[in-house]
Image: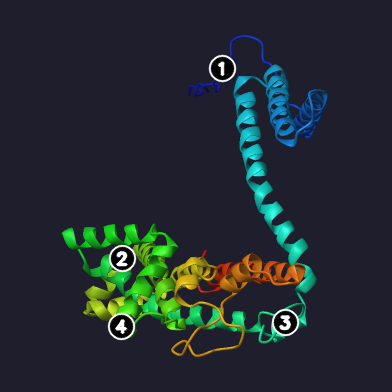
Amino acid sequence: MSTPTRIAPEAPARPAGPVRAQRRLPRFAPLGLFLAGVALGFALSALSGFSIPTAVVYGVLLGTLAVYVASRAVEGRRKATDRLVTSLVTTAFGIAMVPLLSLVWTVLDNGLPRFDAAFFTNSMYRVVGEGGGAYHAILGTLVITALATAISVPIGLMTAIYLVEYASGRLKKSITFFVDVMTGIPSIVAGLFAFALFTLLFGGGVRLGVMGAVALSVLMIPVVVRSCEEVLKLVPNELREASYALGVPKWRTVVKVVLPTAIAGLGTGITLAVARVVGETAPLLVTVGLITGTNLNPFDGRMATLPVFAFYQLTQPGTATQAFLDRAWTAALVLIILVMALNVVARLISRFFAPKTGR
């Protein structure tokens, strides 16, 4: 009985030519080279009359060039190209952060001196110099924004549901087109629209909080529509089809299946739409005006709002100019805090109300 011949496994083919280990720059070498180039750029700018823009341009160019040349010599062309693009993207990010950080620092530096209890508990009633606060303006902003949200959310959400679940053909395209046009209209146009509407209804010279809410809703509705529409499109069609297969009518499918699935995205979009309009100034200048006392009834007379309060404190200071400027900066700081808080709320809604998926 013959013994079966065993075939030895083929050895892997060896690449032709010498095998070279891939060389890489040390971990912190690219950063060190870039910083060295930046320092050299600042030195060159100092020799020719120092200026920050020139120093930044020289530093970025020399730092990026140093990283590229060193990487090309050690790591090869592909890795050098990758490091070049990384340096450019990182530099662009840094340049974009400069105005943001400058803005935040300026507002904090000028707004913190009046960020005290008196600013949040006092109004400007009978205050002509130092003291006073924005209690009336903060409450007015909250009331008008809440009323604008109550107007905008039902209209915007129902329009989005109609576009995603029911509309088709030319009507859908027309609605989408006009929503896109409304998204880009200037805020002053929304204020003039509300002013003209209420002037036709109640005569000239009328100033009401509800006028400001209507103006803000004109700006807020298209944002709600577009954000909610995109979120509703993300709901899988399989969920709708499974509901229809069980004999559930379409309206009930939307209410019980589609909306609960998209609740996190809807809440996030609506919150961001509120943050979009809470700091608008031009529409409120035209429609609401300004008072020094507290008025919480949007259907009776003028109301104070934080953006308009800051505008008048800055542009029409009295005898105590510094006191007016301090109040203006603090009002701007409070507005930034409100917008930031709304964005944090949007993130929390997106995190805690998103549908849970098993792994």
Which SS class for mark 4? helix
Crowd tier of the residue under label 4, counting other residues whose Cα lies within 10 Å: few below 14, some 14–19, many 20 or above: few
Residue type at mark 4? Leu
Q: Residue under circle 3?
A: 132
Residue at 74% over, 72% down: 319
Q: Is residue 114 left or right of residue 179?
A: right
**Mark nearer the N terminus (2 vs 4):** 4
Residue type at mark 3? Gly
**Mark nearer the N terminus (2 vs 1):** 1
Residue 244: image location, x then y, percent: 23, 74
Distance from label 2 to label 1 (Cα)? 50 Å
**Mark nearer the N terminus (1 vs 3):** 1
Whether the residues at callouts 3 and 2 have beta carbons within 8 Å, the answer is: no
Q: Residue under circle 1?
A: 13
Residue type at mark 1? Ala
Distance from label 4 to label 3 (Cα)? 36 Å
Whether the residues at callouts 1 and 4 have beta carbons within 8 Å, the answer is: no
Q: Residue under circle 4?
A: 201
